[in-house]
Image (cartoon, rainbow, N blue to C red):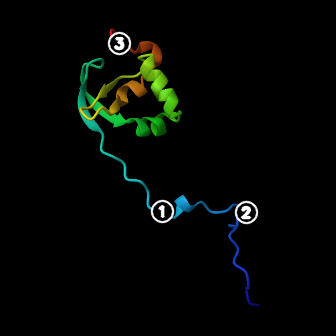
Amino acid sequence: MQLTKLHLVSPTGLIPNISDRLPPIPETVPMRHFCDFCKRETDFIPIYQAVRLSSVSRSTIYYWMEKHWIHWRSLPSKRRVICRESLSMPMTCIPVQKGA
């Protein structure tokens, strides 16, 4: 028996995703900074990692930042990074940032 057609459908019936064949995106090493709210040195992560870690949308992260429910700091490049500890805190326990 000779096959004359190539099938693009996987055994599960789904077309394979091209990203499955690409190498994984390397994780960036968290940056250590002093968090003014946690009062200690903690890991700060980029927003895209906070999105993946918390399983919410990017706009939700920005909303949390606006409501001061998570801690962040701005880098000299104007990029914002998120305190990883504040992502794991209950939102009612995070102090409100005054004057920001």
Label located before the other in sequence (2 or 3): 2
**Residue at the farthest bottom position:** 1
* Residue to which mark 3 is pinned: 97
Please state which of residues 1 and 64 is positioned toward the viewer in this rendering: 64
Label disc, if present, on residue 22 of the rendered structure? 1
**Residue at the farthest right position:** 1
Going by the numbered disc 3, the residue's amino acid type is Gln
**72 to the left or right of 14:** left
Of circles 1 and 2, which is in front? 1
**57 to the left or right of 29:** right
Whole-percent x, y for residue 75 in the image: 26, 31
Measured in 3D between alpha carbons, the distance from the residue under mark 2 to the one under mark 3, in whole angstroms, is: 51 Å
Label located before the other in sequence (1 or 3): 1
Instruction: Name the residue at 43% across, 35% down.
Output: 50
Label disc, if present, on residue 13 of the rendered structure? 2
Q: Secondary structure at mark 3?
A: loop
Instruction: Name the residue at 46% across, 13% down.
Output: 92
Going by the numbered disc 2, the residue's amino acid type is Gly
Label disc, if present, on residue 48 of the rendered structure? none
